Image (spheres, grey):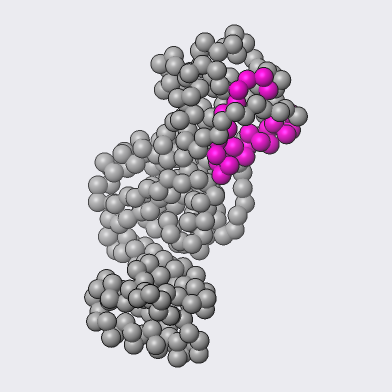
Amino acid sequence: MNFSLLKLEIVELLDKHKKITAVAEQLGLKQPTVTFHMKSMEQELGVQLFETRSGKTILTEAGRSLYHYAVKINALAQEAGRVVKEFDELGRGTLKIGASYVPGTYLLPKVLSGFAKAYPRITLSLQVKTAPVIQELLRNHEIDLGILSTEPFQSAPLIAETVCEDELVVVFAPRHRLAAYPQLYPDQLSEAPFLLHGPESSTRQMTDRWAQSNRVQLKAHMELDSLEAIKQVVMQGESVSFVSRQAVQREVERGELEFRPIPQNPFKRYVYCAYNADRRQSAVMERFIDFLRQEAR
């Protein structure tokens, strides 16, 4: 079996474009050359990988299986090239970062801005997704580094290092009746209209566990997958929610929101810097991690 990176690129691009002409154009090849490689792969494996439907070239079930590995191998090849070049020209390079919503919105903007000024020849890119999605992107080598806010986790082959604690608090409007209490109790939260985060959110998962551990039935009257939307609704005066203290720092300083520690909360959440153990850390990644730690102190 003789699989070149070019053949695997063809498989990945065909799934994206569904047109041989588009694949040939992107690779700078002639259409017959792409077709030749497609037939060559099918002959080597002895199975049909591609089929034509309604003028589109799509992957068969066998082709989808090959695509699964093609994506990972292509990503690793690109990653290897970038890492090696970064050692040749220290201070240059690219870094693909993925972050969950809290660090991506409230921690990283300042870090990215400062790092870009210190290292202007390094190109940074950022994707903001949920923590589980960031972990999956790391496993597939689609990003170099993940900055995620979550509870302690172990998920081989990922390695996670703690950056700082990400404390969850109860937030409410200054005129809310809970503002009269310096300390809250679980039963008090069961009486207030509660805003839930989306089901994929690590905050939502922790909220559900907190309610279960304290035997509290929350009056969940609304579910929102936008942290900014949750803050805006809470400001209206009636609702409460659990959010990261980092996320409401400005609103608290302006007197738009108040917060209290979550009562009887045994769960801790941290901001982690995570990477794939199969990826060798480049000089660029090491510099960014050091910069992140300094800024998060």
Instruction: Note whether 19 is above or below 275 in the view shown.
Output: below
Q: Outermost residue, right direction?
A: 215
- Decide which of 63, 297 is in the foreground and name it: 63
Q: Quadrant of residue 199?
A: top right
Asked where in the image residue 207 lies, by quadrant, the reply is top right
Foreground of the two, 22 or 41: 22
Check the image and report above or below for 128 versus 267. Answer: below
* Residue 175 seen anywhere in this rendered image of the structure: yes
Query: Residue at left 41%, top 37%?
Result: 105
Residue 208 on the magenta span: yes
Question: Residue 195, percent across and down?
Answer: 56, 28
- Which one is nearer the viewer's eye here, 77 or 7? 7
Q: How many marks?
A: 0
Vertical order, 200 against 42 (above or below):
above
In the image, is residue 286 part of the stretch drawn in magenta?
no
- Measured as percent of width and height from the top left, residue 269 is found at 59, 37
Taking the spot 29% from the left edge, 85% from the top edge, the residue there is 33
**What residue span does the magenta drawing correspond to?**
190-214
Q: Does 79 sit above or below residue 123? A: below
Q: Residue lying at the far front in this picture: please name it.
A: 54
User: Quick check: 12 left or right of 193?
Assistant: left
Q: Residue at x 45, y 87 (%)?
A: 42
Query: Is residue 1 visible in the rendered structure shown here?
Result: no
> Residue at horizontal 65%, vertical 26%?
219
Q: Position of residue 282 (x, y in %)?
A: 39, 58
